[in-house]
Image: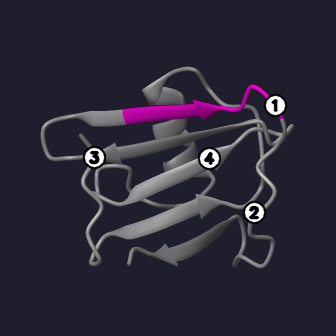
Amino acid sequence: MIQIIPQMQIWMAVEAGGLSPRIDGLARVCRELLKMDPFSGALFVFRNKRATAIKLLVYDGQGFWLCQKRLSRGRFRWWPTDGVGSQKTLMAH
């Protein structure tokens, strides 16, 4: 189970893109596009272009967790657009 604590960094990929079906592809996006270390323990959030699915990627010290939520109807309405470059930091509360 992914445990989100107040000290955890949460990074959202502002630019929606195709969601790689594999952990390695999303970790590559973290390194190359977001310029972040996927092994840092931060939670990374990605959304597809149609805004119908999101994926969460986090490394817990033993391995990666990958979670996906795909809506059967509608779209994710809120998504940040004012990030610096291709990412935005959120805070866990």
Helix or strand or loop: what does disc 1 sit on? loop
Residue 72 sits in quarter: top right
Front of the two marks 2 and 4: 2
Q: CA distance from mark 2 to mark 4?
A: 10 Å
Residue 79 image label: 2
Q: Residue, x 29% and y 50% (percent of image)?
A: 39
Left or right: residue 71 versus residue 24 is right
Q: CA distance from mark 1 to mark 2?
A: 17 Å
Tell me, what colour scheme is on the image? one colour
Q: Which residue is mark 3?
A: 2
Q: Which one is earlier in the sequence, the residue at label 3 or at label 2? A: 3
Helix or strand or loop: what does disc 2 sit on? loop
- Label 1–label 4 contact, CB within 8 A: no
Q: Is residue 86 magenta?
A: no
Residue 49 sits in quarter: top right
Q: Which one is earlier in the sequence, the residue at label 2 or at label 4? A: 4
Q: Residue, x 62% and y 47% (percent of image)?
A: 46
Task: Please state which amino acid type lies under the numbered disc 1.
Answer: Arg
Task: Please state which amino acid type lies under the numbered disc 3.
Answer: Ile
Magenta-highlighted residues: 66-73
Q: Which residue is mark 1?
A: 73
Where in the figure is residue 9, as x and y percent of width and height?
Answer: 38, 70
- Label 4–label 3 contact, CB within 8 A: no
Where in the figure is residue 82, as x and y percent of width and height?
Answer: 78, 79
Q: Which residue is mark 4?
A: 46
